[in-house]
Image (tube, rainbow, N blue to C red):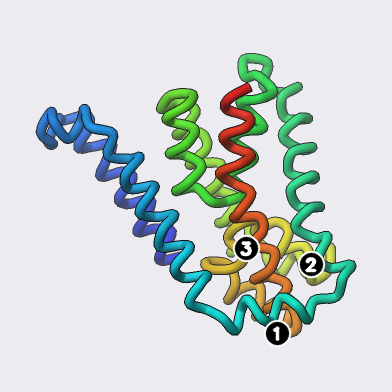
């Protein structure tokens, strides 16, 4: 939760800097977000590659449980398609692009801002932050009402990092490997799906 608040704080600081033009024009006009995104993707790859125990533990998963990331992706996109009916001013591809962030707000919002503009980028940021916060705050109720897999699915791409501790505490330690596997695959799908829906 603290990490999320720090990221949101930097986002608000960026808005303030943009409104009051506190940064030099050369910085404002440069494609800084693209280079930051490249650096972010590099370090995500380094963190996954360095953790060899995590990569080896994926082999121990129950074959049926490996379908959970696919179900998360399909369920999220189905929900976004239904949301289009309630948001007539937004196209289906806009809603699918926002939903394809799966909680990975830092990555998806940058892509969507580049492809569809800052307004939809901000919507993506807020929608994905809300997804993470719902997982962090609602995990105990999800486990009670819908079972131990529900906070993993709701957490989306965040289940291998920020929401992993709360999932472990409420769903049980036996779901740690599944949570990591789920987060890794859903996380990996974000740039492909967001780019796909933004390009259509």
Q: Residue at x 65, y 25 (%)?
A: 93
Q: Determine crowd level at label 2: few under 14, some 14-19, many 20+ residues with C-alpha closer than 10 A.
A: some
Distance of label 1 from label 3 (alpha carbons)? 18 Å
Residue in the image at 87% along x and 70% along y: 63
Identify the residue shown where x is 33% and y is 45%. 11
Q: CA distance from mark 1 to mark 2?
A: 12 Å
Q: Position of residue 8 (x, y in %)?
A: 38, 50
Mark linked to residue 184:
3
Left of 124 or right of it: where is 3? left
Q: Earlier in the sequence, mark 1 or mark 2?
A: 2
> Which numbered marker is on residue 149?
2
Q: Secondary structure at mark 3?
A: helix
Q: Toward which corner of the image does residue 117 lie, by quadrant? A: top left
Q: Are marks 1 and 2 in contact (CB under 8 Å)?
A: no
Mark nearer the N terminus (2 vs 3): 2
Q: How many marks?
A: 3
Q: Is residue 181 left or right of residue 190?
A: right
Question: Could you tell me if residue 3 is visible in this image?
Answer: yes
Residue receiving disc 1: 173
- Which of the two discs, 2 and 3, sits closer to the camera? 3
Q: Who is closer to the viewer here, 67 or 176?
A: 67
Asked if the residue under mark 3 is in contact with the one under mark 1, i.e. CB atoms within 8 Å, the reply is no
């Amino acid at each position: 939760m603290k990490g999320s608040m720090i990221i949101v704080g930097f986002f608000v600081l960026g808005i303030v800097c943009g409104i009051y033009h506190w940064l030099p024009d050369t910085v404002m006009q440069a494609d800084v977000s693209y280079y930051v995104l490249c650096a972010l993707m590099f370090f995500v790859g380094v963190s996954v590659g360095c953790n060899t125990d995590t990569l080896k533990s994926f082999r121990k998963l129950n074959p049926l449980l490996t379908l959970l990331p696919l179900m998360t992706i399909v369920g999220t996109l189905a929900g976004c398609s239904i949301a289009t009916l309630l948001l007539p001013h937004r196209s289906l591809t806009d809603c699918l692009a926002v939903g394809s962030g799966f909680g990975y707000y830092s990555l998806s919002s940058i892509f969507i801002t580049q492809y569809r503009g800052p307004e939809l980028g901000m919507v993506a940021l807020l929608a994905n932050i809300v997804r993470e916060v719902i997982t962090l705050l609602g995990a105990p109720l999800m486990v009670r009402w819908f079972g131990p897999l529900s906070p993993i699915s709701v957490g989306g791409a965040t289940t291998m990092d920020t929401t992993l501790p709360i999932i472990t505490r409420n769903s049980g330690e036996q779901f740690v490997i599944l949570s990591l596997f789920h987060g890794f695959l859903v996380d990996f799908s974000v740039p492909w799906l967001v780019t796909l829906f933004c390009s259509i």
